[in-house]
Amino acid sequence: MSGPEPWAEEARAMVDRLPPMSAEVADAMRRVPRHVFVSSEYRRTAYADEPLPLPFGEATISAPHMVALQLDFAEVGRGHRVLEVGVGSGYLAALLATLVGPSGAVYGLDIEAGLVREAERRVGALALGVPVHLRLGDGREGWPDAAPFDRILVSCATPSLRPEWQAQTREGGILVAPVGDAYSQVLTRLRKTGPAGRLEAGPECRFVPLRGVSDAIYRP
Ligand code: SAH
């Protein structure tokens, strides 16, 4: 995956321009080609620090600095079983797979069938050697059959840390989600330790909203 390809230099330069991040996240962001996850018309800006539209639904691939923040804030590490709600392009899922390594596993849900299909193809083509399971589904319910997870990362704006996600986070694990309304959210972290857990507020952010199934079916 690394080597002489021109994108590898672009990815390195992208990481150098971003705010500081952990060495592990920086390494993963240098190794996963972001251009593979954007539509061909955006190839030229694939390594700029910008969100870009995806071909289905209201989805965007998040800006690289936001992706780095999500990964660092969730303290994703080797061997973790991770769930992402809202896989979109699959870029974050590919980074998660790189971070957890072959002893970990990544599960991802999206409510748009076209995105799930594309994300599967793109992540699969990288041949990361890590189990990655992507599925069409309503992320509001989490993935109860595969729970518990060491980490759950929600990649769409949500009014609350849903009880389903809290229940599916392993004791000692971490749930990270952008909590707020459709326009502005606070990246929020729940450390599930003890009966109440510990809630921590991170930076402000803006993600596309978590939708209900009916929105997906009846959207014009
Ligand atoms: N992290 C992604 C970007 C996600 S954008 C990336 O790296 O590309 C947010 C995604 O959440 C969109 O793809 C949208 O379709 C999805 N989404 C919205 N509501 C959802 C729901 N209820 N369940 C699952 N996915 C949902």
Image (spheres, rainbow, N blue to C red):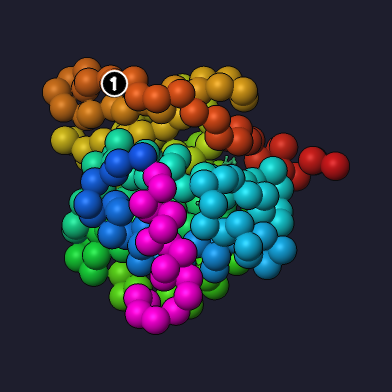
Which quadrant of the figure contains the N terminus?
A: bottom left
Residues drawn in magenta: 1-18
Q: Residue at x 62, y 24 (%)?
A: 182
Residue 107 can be seen, yes or no: no
Q: Residue at x 54, y 52 (%)?
A: 48
Ligand 1 positioned in quadrant = top right
Q: Which residue is mark 1?
A: 200
Q: Is residue 70 above or below residue 10?
A: above
Residue toward you, 71 or 14: 14
Looking at the image, which residue sits at the far bottom? Answer: 4
Residue toward you, 207 or 219: 207
The crowding category of the residue bearing disc 1, from other C-alpha atoms within 10 Å (few below 14, some 14 to 19, many at least 20), is few
Instruction: Give the overall secondary structure of the magenta segment.
Output: helix
Residue 80 placement (x, y as % from top left): 23, 53
Residue 180 can be seen, yes or no: yes
Q: Secondary structure at mark 1?
A: strand
Residue toward you, 186 or 177: 186
- Asked where in the image residue 218 lies, by quadrant, the reply is top right
Residue toward you, 127 or 110: 127
